[in-house]
Amino acid sequence: SPVSPIGFVHLGSYTAKLGDINEGYHYEKLARSLIDKVGSRESAGEVIAFGASIRQYVEPLQATLEYHNEGYAAAMASGDIIQAALNNMFSLGSSLFAGVNLQTTRDKCAELCIFLYERKMLIFMMNIKYF
């Protein structure tokens, strides 16, 4: 089913939050492989947004930044601006801890604010103002 990857990535997220990070990572990888096998990229933005939160415990934090960029592109390609915004926000938060240049992070934050304002995503805008 095209929505199976979403179920597996959320299962992996919950499993990891309960303490079994390796098992959660296994489900995240399964969700990622199902996206490729199903052939539908409609759920890729959500799978990547939530899967990266698991990957951050297993892979270098800098690697997950590129993963979020891929999630943003996939979400925008399928017209899912909510998941695109989430990937951008998660990437921005991770950038602060990954040691990305602060000026670069500030510029990305300004771009994200414009993205959110143009799409009238007020809830996200309230969250981003605290960065």
Image: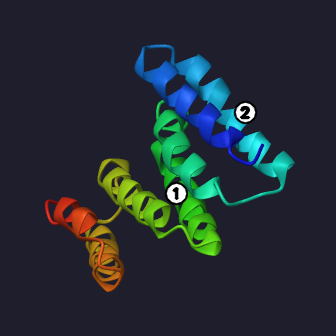
The quarter of the displayed image where residue 104 is located: bottom left
Q: Is residue 1 left or right of residue 101?
A: right
Q: Which is nearer the N-term, disc 1 or disc 2?
A: 2
Q: How is the image coloured?
A: rainbow
Q: The C terminus lies in which quarter of the figure?
A: bottom left
Measured in 3D between alpha carbons, the distance from the residue under mark 1 to the one under mark 2, in whole angstroms, is 18 Å
Which amino acid lies under the numbered mark 1 shown in the image of this protein?
Answer: His
In the depicted structure, whether residue 71 falls above or below residue 64? below
Is 130 drawn above or below residue 12 in the view shown? below
Q: Residue at x 70, y 43 (%)?
A: 32
Mark 1 residue crowding within 10 angstroms, few (<14) / some (14–19) / many (20+): many
Q: Are marks 1 and 2 in contact (CB under 8 Å)?
A: no
Query: At 30% from the left edge and 72% from the top edge, which residue is drawn?
Result: 121
Q: Position of residue 105 (x, y in %)?
A: 31, 68
Residue 79 numbered tag: none
The residue pinned by badge 1 equals: 68
Amino acid type, mark 2 = Leu
Q: Is residue 74 above or below residue 45?
A: below
Name the image quarter holding the N terminus: top right
Q: Secondary structure at mark 2?
A: helix
Q: In the image, residue 66 lies at what x, y percent?
A: 56, 58
The residue at the far left in this view is 130
Name, please, the residue furthest toward the top: 19
Q: Where is residue 69? Give x, y as percent.
A: 54, 64
- Local secondary structure at mark 1: helix
Marks 1, 2: nearer the viewer = 2
Res 124 quadrant in image = bottom left
The one of 129 and 61 positioned closer to us in this rendering: 129
Count the numbered circles shown. Answer: 2
> Residue drawn 41% across and 22% down?
17
User: Which residue bears the numbered disc 2?
Assistant: 30
| Image point (64%, 54%), residue name | 43
